[in-house]
Image (tube, rainbow, N blue to C red):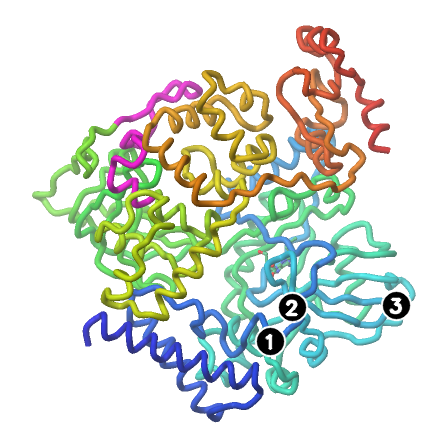
Amino acid sequence: MDDEKNYQNYLKKIKLFQKYNKHYYDLNQPLVDDYQFDKLKLEIIDIEKKNSFSKHKDSPSYSVGFKPSKIFKKIKHKSPMLSLANAFSEEDLINFEKKILNFLNNEPGIILNYSAEPKIDGISASLIFKNGKFVTGLSRGDGKEGEDITENLKTIEDIPYFIKSKNFPKEIDIRGEVFIQNSDFEKLKSKFANPRNAASGSLRQKDPKETKKIPLKFIAYTFGYEKGLKAKSQDEYLKNLKEWGFKTNPLNKTLKKIENLMTNYHEIEKKRGDIDFDIDGIVYKVNNFQLQKRLGNVANAPRWAIAHKFSANSAISRIKDIEIQIGRTGALTPVAKINPVNIGGVVVSNATLHNEEEIKRKDIRVGDTVIVERAGDVIPHVISVELDKREKNSKKYNFPTKCPCGFKTIKEFNKVTKKFDAVRRCPDRGYECDKMAKEKLKHFVSKEALNIEGFGKKIVENFWSLGLIKLPQDIFNLNYSKIENMDGWGKQSVANLKYSINLRKTISFERFIYALGIRHIGLENAKIISKNLKSLKNFIALSKKSNFDDLINIDGIGETQINSIKVFFSNETNLNVLKNLDKLLKVKDTEISKAGGLLNNKTFMFTGKLSNMSRSEAKSLIEQNSGSIVSNVTKKLDYLIIGEKPTNRKVDAAKNLGVKILDQSTWLKMLK
Ligand code: IVH
C-alpha cells in the first residue's frame, strides 16, 4: 500500500474509533463489544508504529480507553500541580545546588539536605482530605485544572478513606503517583502499550467498576495546599504519610552532598530491573520546608527540586551522511544520518552533531563508526568516534560556508566571552532564506505560539511547497477550496483546519510576541515584554522610535534581546508581517492581574548589597506580592531600595525625580 492509501486507511479507523468512543462514553450505548473495541485500538497503534505520519489527535495512543474531556467534571487545583526540571549528569546537579545556594545568598554554614525519591513513571493524582475524610480526587490535567476522578481513585486499596490520626491536618491535598506493578501489567500486555498507559487508561474509565478490575497502586510523595500540617521537612512528612496509612516509596532516602546523591543514583539504577515498578530517575527535593518556601518556583517547576534522569542508552552505528539543517534562527545544525539502530526501544536514524566546532573537535567524518546516545526526551547525539574502525581512505568533513538557500553564513563574535560562536548561522533576513522561513512558520503555528491544532510541521512543509503559505499572514488567507481538492484532504478535514485557524484569530499579546520567532525572545522574554509593553500597539510603536527606551528599562531584557528586536524591526518583510497580522488578528492587551498583593502594581529597583538575601530572592519576593522590578531609575520607578554600598548615581537620580528611597528593613516591613 502506498503512503497515501495507508494514511486514508488510518483516518478511517480513527473515525470509527471516534464513533465507538462517542457511543460508549457519551451516549452510554456501546456499538461493539470490548474485544472489537480493543482490537481496533491495537490496529491503530500498530499502523502508527509502522508509519512516520503524525498521530491524529484522537488517536488511542494519546487516550487509551477514555474520552478525557467530557465525562469528568473539571476542577481547579488550589495549588498548581507543577512539573520538575531535569538533570542528566553530575554537572547538572552541581549547578542545581549552586543556583540554590546563590539564591539563598550563599549564607555561610548552609548544608543542603535532600530527600532522594525514586521517580515512579505513573500518573500523578491529588487527593483532598477534609476532617480526615477523602472527599475529592483529581487528575493532574494541565497542572492548573484537573478532572474529578474521585470515584475511580476510591477503588484503589492503597488510598485510605478515613484517617483518624491525631496529627492529621484539618485539610490537606495529598499528592502521589498512581501506577501498575510490572507483574500485574503482564496480564494486561495485550491491551496497553506500557504500564503507564494502562494506569492512565484505567484510572479514567467512566465506570469505576472497570477501574477496580485493574490492580492500581498509589504511592504518596508531596502535598498541595494544607491547613494544619505539622511537619517541617520532607522526610518528616514522608514519615507522617506512613503513619496515616499511605504507602511511600521504600527506596526513599535523606542525603546530603552531591557525591552521595550520585552513589545512591548508581545503586538504584543497578537495582532498576529488580524493582516491580517502572522508575525513570530520582527526584531530589530540598528537605527543609522553610527553605522550599523561600526558594519558590520558576515558571512551572519548583526551584527546590529536580529529577535526575537515568542515564541514556547508547548504541553503535555508522554515519551514512551528514546533513545540514537550518533552524528558525538560522543556525546550521549538522545531523548525522546513521544506519538505524534500536536504542532503548526507539529506532534511531538521525543523531545531532551540534555544530561545526563539535565536528572539528571530535573529527567526525562520513563513514565513521560512532557511539550514539539517547537520553530522555533529548535528541540523540553522537558521543564519540571508534577510530580503530575508521576506513583508510576517509576524508575530513568540510563544513559548508554557505546556507543551502545560497546566502553566505557567519559566525558571530560574542562580546561577553570574546570568542567567535561555535555555531555558524545564516544571518536573519526576515523571510528571505527559504529554510528559515519555513521554520519560522512552523514555530508560528506551534503549541506554545499560536497553537493551531492540526497544523503540524508536515502541513507547513506541504503548503509551503505548493506556494500556499510564505508568510505568517498567509495562514489566515488560505484558499480552502483549493485545499479541499488536494490529495489527502476533504470537506471535513478542511472544515476542521479552518475551524482551528479561526479559533486562534484572537490571541494573547504574550503568545503573539513569542510566535514572531524573534531570536533571543523565547517564552520567558515574551512574557516579560508583554507585561511591560501591554499591547501590540506599543510594540509596533517601537519601530517608529529611533530609540528603544521602552525596552531598556525592563528588568530581564538586556542588550542582546534589544539588539535582536532592532534587527527584527529593521527588516521590511518583518514590518509587513506585523502590519498584516495586526489587521487580521485580535491581539488582546496584557491583563495585569489585580492579584491584590501587598505591592500591587508598584515598581522597585535595588542598588547595593542586601543582607541575608540574594537579588533573585528579593526579586522573587516582590513578584510574589504583585510588584515588579525595573532596571533603571526613571519617573516610572516607585521605590529605590538601598542596601550596603549603593551606587550614588542611582540614589541621586532617584532623589532628583522624587522617587521614594527605602532601606532593606523598611521595605521588608511593607511585606509584613
Ligand atoms: S514531587 C514538586 N515527587 O514527576 C513537583 N513527583 O516531573 C513535582 N513524580 O508530575 C511533584 N515521583 O508525576 C514528586 N517522588 C516524587 C515523584 C514525582 C514521580 C512525578 C509526578 C510529577 C512528575 C514531575
Mark 3 C-beta closer than 8 Å to ligand 1: no
**Residue at the spot of label 2:** 147
Residue type pointed to by label 2 = Glu
| Label 2 crowd bin: few (<14), some (14–19), many (20+), radius 10 Å | many
Task: Count the labels in the image.
Answer: 3
Label 2 to label 1, Cα distance in Å?
A: 9 Å
Whether residue 438 is in magenta: the answer is yes
Q: Amino acid at mark 3?
A: Asn
Was residue 347 drawn as part of the magenta stretch in this picture? no
> Measuring 40% from the left and 84% from the top, which residue is drawn there?
40
- Which-is-in-front pick, marks 2 and 1? 2
Magenta segment? 410-439
Q: Is mark 1 within 8 Å of ligand 1?
A: no
Q: Give the number of the mark in front: 1 or 3.
A: 1
Label 1 SS: loop
> How many angstroms separate mark 1 from mark 3 (CA)?
26 Å
At a point 62% along the width and 78% down the height, the residue shown is 216
Residue receiving disc 3: 131
User: Which residue lies under the disc numbered 1?
Assistant: 204
Labels 3, 2: front one: 2
- Residue 55 drawn at (x, y percent): 38, 67
Image spot of residue 655 (x, y percent):
75, 8
